Image (spheres, coloured by chain):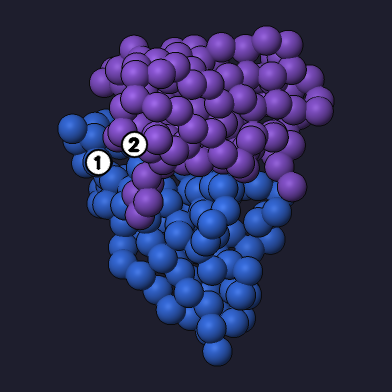
Chain colours: A purple, B blue
Amino acid sequence: QSVLTQPPSASGTPGQRVTVSCSASSPILATGSIIWYQQFPGAAPKLLIYDENQRPSGVPDRFSGFKSGSSASLAISGLQSEDEGVYFCAVWHGSLDGVVFGGGTRLTVL
Amino acid sequence: QAQLVQSGAEVKEPGASVTISCGASGYTFIGYTIHWVRQAPGQSPEWMGWINPGNVNTQYSQKFQDRLTITSDTLARKVYMKLTSLRSEDRAIYYCARGQYGWAFDVWGQGTTVSVSS
């Protein structure tokens, strides 16, 4: 059981804006470093967002991260079929044993 | 560009040990930490530990503290992860990943599948 809770699934149609949430029962998200990964079947996770809302070079600006209190969200605008995959939030906090991953949200593009 | 290449799949019996290598190229090896993350089938990733090849400092998850050893070889530009006393629950894909922006992992190896079966 992860300290981070994500909905198991999400969906949207092409062009739509969808959000994936990540919540925690403790205040770790309020002060921790929030990270988002995208994973396709048979592949390693790919870094999408770090430090809550920073994108590494090469990640489209369709992907954005934001935080509100004890929850964080990943927003994907202009949804595309190739966005279909599993999205994991992760957090590092000094009170945790290293970095902790959420359970993942499977995104389906309808 | 930066790349991490891992050794091949392993099949081990319960109680055995496994060592996986992770070769780095395309960047300054001693400038970044290397983390090990595993992912059991259908599960989310699980962080195991890291090493700083620059000073060989390591940090391990408490869960693996007694069974995990991470080492590095600067000349070979390789990091090694050894997990001992394997059990069925250790069946997973093991990834090495480069630490960047703090605790984010921006470059990942292709993964090494470890099977544990008698």
Which residue does the image show at 35% across and 70% down from the upper left?
B9
Q: Is residue B69 visible?
A: no
Relative depth, front residue between B52 and B84: B84
Q: Position of residue A49 (x, y in %)?
A: 45, 21
Ranked by sequence position, the earlier of labels 1 and 2 is 1
**Secondary structure type for disc 2:** strand
Q: Position of residue B47 (x, y in %)?
A: 57, 45
Q: Are marks 1 and 2 on the same chain?
A: yes
**Secondary structure type for disc 1:** strand
Amino acid carrying mark 2 in the image:
Val
Marks 2 and 1: in contact by CB < 8 Å?
yes
Q: Which residue is mark 2?
A: B107
Q: Position of residue A105 (x, y in %)?
A: 55, 38
Residue B54 in the image: above or below residue B91 = above
Q: Is residue A103 visible?
A: yes
Which residue does the image show at 31% across and 56% down from the upper left?
B6
Which residue does the image show at 61% across and 41% down from the upper left?
A8
Q: Specify the quadrant that holds the C terminus of chain B.
A: bottom right
Left/right of residue A32 with respect to residue A104 in the rendered view: right
Amino acid carrying mark 1 in the image:
Gln
Which residue does the image show at 41% across and 56% down from the upper left?
B80
Relative depth, front residue between A107 and A5: A107
Q: Position of residue A27 (x, y in %)?
A: 78, 20
The chain that hosts pointer 1 is: B
Q: Which residue is mark 1?
A: B3
Marker count (numbered): 2
Residue A51 in the image: above or below residue A40 = above
For residue A22, what is the image quadrant? top right
